């Protein structure tokens, strides 16, 4: 069995913890709790008949007051870059985080999650911005930790990419 370390990256309150909780436990909690430092969960999945255990490192959000501790990324096989689709600024922050990770680790697999797609009426990330990311060759998925929409697909796509397969 393969084990792969995956880091959850993005701003505060974009839904990193909620996505992990929905994926690992099939639960969603309305109450917001800030992650302090790092919380590690794991889940085993099957990719093309191969068993893979994901070690999910849910890292504290990155903002103007607290920057991502790059040492948490050591040994990462990939990452989920999360933005809140209802807050355009979190996409800009995610792009900054991506550049810092790329500088520190080089090119490693990642998937871009635009979370909170259940709040379509409040959506701020434009279709043009999404298409721009896809034009870079990125895998971009709209997801909802609340409803579960595309959550399984996010982690499955990332696992496939980390195994060198098409997401």
Image: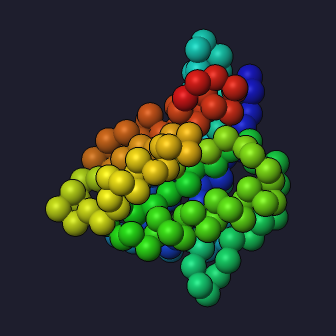
Q: Quadrant of residue 108?
A: top right
Structure colour scheme:
rainbow
- Residue 143 horizontal/vertical position (percent): 36, 47
Given the current orientation, which residue lies at the most extreme left position? 121
Q: Measured from the top left, where is residue 144 in percent x and y?
A: 33, 50
Q: Is residue 25 left or right of residue 95?
A: left
Q: Quadrant of the C terminus?
A: top right
Q: Give me the residue at 40% from left, 63% from top.
A: 84
Q: Quadrant of residue 97?
A: bottom right
Q: Residue furthest top?
A: 49
Which of the pair 25/123 is nearer the observer?
123
Q: Position of residue 67 (x, y in %)?
A: 67, 77
Most foreground residue, 17 or 144? 144
Q: Locate the N terminus and report the quarter of the image it occupies.
A: top right
Q: Name the residue: 74% across, 33% down.
A: 3
The residue that appears at 46% across and 69% down in the rendered structure is 90
Answer yes or no: is residue 30 visible. no
* Residue depicted at x 46% and y 51%: 132
Residue 35's x, y, as percent? 56, 70
Residue 166 can be seen, yes or no:
yes
Task: Look at the picture and state if 87 lies above or below 115.
Answer: below
- Give 126 or 84, whichever is nearer the viewer: 126
- Number of callouts: 0
């Amino acid at each position: 069995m393969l084990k792969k370390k995956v880091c959850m990256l993005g701003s505060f309150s974009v839904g990193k913890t909620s996505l992990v909780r929905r994926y690992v436990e099939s639960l969603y909690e309305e109450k917001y709790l800030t992650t302090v430092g790092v919380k590690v969960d794991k889940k085993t999945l099957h990719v093309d008949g191969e068993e893979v255990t994901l070690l999910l490192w849910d890292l504290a959000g990155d903002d103007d007051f607290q920057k991502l501790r790059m040492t948490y990324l050591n040994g990462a096989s990939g990452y989920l870059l999360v933005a809140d689709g209802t807050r355009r600024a979190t996409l800009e922050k995610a792009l900054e985080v991506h550049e810092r990770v790329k500088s520190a680790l080089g090119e490693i697999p990642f998937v871009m999650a635009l979370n909170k797609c259940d709040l379509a009426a409040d959506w701020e990330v434009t279709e043009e911005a999404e298409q721009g990311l896809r034009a870079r060759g990125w895998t971009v998925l709209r997801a909802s930790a609340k409803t579960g929409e595309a959550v399984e697909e996010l982690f499955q796509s990332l696992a496939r990419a980390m195994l060198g397969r098409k997401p």
